[in-house]
Image: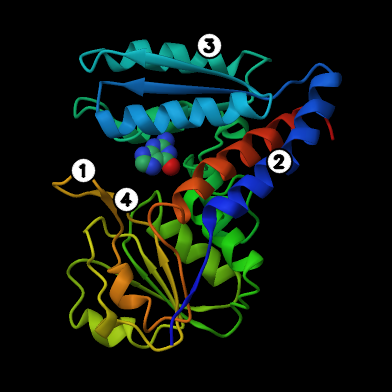
Amino acid sequence: MTAQIIDGKALADELRQSFKARVEALAAKGHRPGLVVILVGADPASEVYVRNKVNGCLAIGMHSEKITYEATVDQETVLAKIAELNADPNIHGILVQLPLPRHFDEEKVLEAIAADKDVDGFHAENVGALAQGNPRFIPCTPYGVMKMFEKGGVDLTGQEAVVIGRSNIVGKPMALLLINAGATVTVCNSRTRDLKFHTRRADILVAAIGKPKFVTADMVKPGAVVIDVGINRLPDGKLCGDVDFAGCLEVAGQITPVPGGVGPMTITMLLANTIEAAERKAGL
Ligand code: GUN
């Protein structure tokens, strides 16, 4: 059996089109949604992500700007900028691109962002709300994955879900969302003993481990829904996911490609969160 491919690009385009009317309605009331993205240092991958975030906003009529700092900037300068943006009524979302240089205290920086402008959903208050099953801002990548399940008619209730990866950005919030949706959730990591034992039981398998083609066909339960969150650059410059797509395509029931799967959905949900922040501010 060849799996059905979940087209994240098409879903992202459809959602972004639908956001335009919300943006214009807000703009007409003087609340054009605005996102600031802060980039510290010149990591090439981060530069691409940040450019795509800003352009994604501009393409649907939102306001967006990038603020860049040298990698050597001191933390106080960035914290002062965040305080200024917290108080700026024209800015509804603030995102600090991760990772930060090593001399930064990442937690302190993320906690400095006002919780009602934390469109990444990384502030402890927002993480707590998600853990309690009452989310305010959902981290963009797992939020995008949930939208893909919704679009694909995947009912998560009672399903065995396995997440490979336990990061704050993807693995942990993904697990919380799956728990909240009624799945039976196992969170694995690179040191899990007999990983295959777990993955082969999964009706839903989410790979977010950052290792190219790590999930092979023998690790996948026939008919499973396989979600590939990885974006890895191969020596030849091509992108590939954490899943061996060609192999798993023959075993899975549904599968996301890389590129064109989860990636476009991440920025789409960032736009959704920023629009929602602006709507809350406008009392809509
Ligand atoms: N770095 C990799 N993914 C993300 C993300 O979703 N948000 C931020 N702020 N940084 C990231």
**Whereabouts is ligand 1, in terms of quadrant?**
top left
Q: Are marks 1 and 2 in contact (CB under 8 Å)?
A: no
Question: Mark 3 = which residue?
Answer: 84
Tell me the kind of residue under disc 4: Ile
Element carrying mark 3:
helix
Q: Which mark is residue 17?
A: 2
- Tell me the quarter of the image containing the N terminus: bottom left
Q: Earlier in the sequence, mark 2 or mark 3?
A: 2
Q: Closer to the camera: disc 4 or disc 2?
A: 2
Q: Are marks 1 and 3 in contact (CB under 8 Å)?
A: no
Element carrying mark 1:
loop
Asked if one can make out residue 164 in the rendered structure from this viewpoint, the answer is yes
Q: What is the crowding at mark 3: few (fewer than 14 residues within 10 Å), some, or many (at least 20)? A: few
Element carrying mark 4:
loop
Tell me the kind of residue under disc 2: Gln
Q: Earlier in the sequence, mark 1 or mark 3?
A: 3
Between residue 78 and residue 218, name the one nearer to us: 218
Is 259 placed left or right of 74 in the picture?
right
Q: Earlier in the sequence, mark 4 or mark 2?
A: 2
Indicate the position of residue 65 as horizontal and vertical percent values.
Answer: 52, 16
Question: Mark 1 = which residue?
Answer: 237
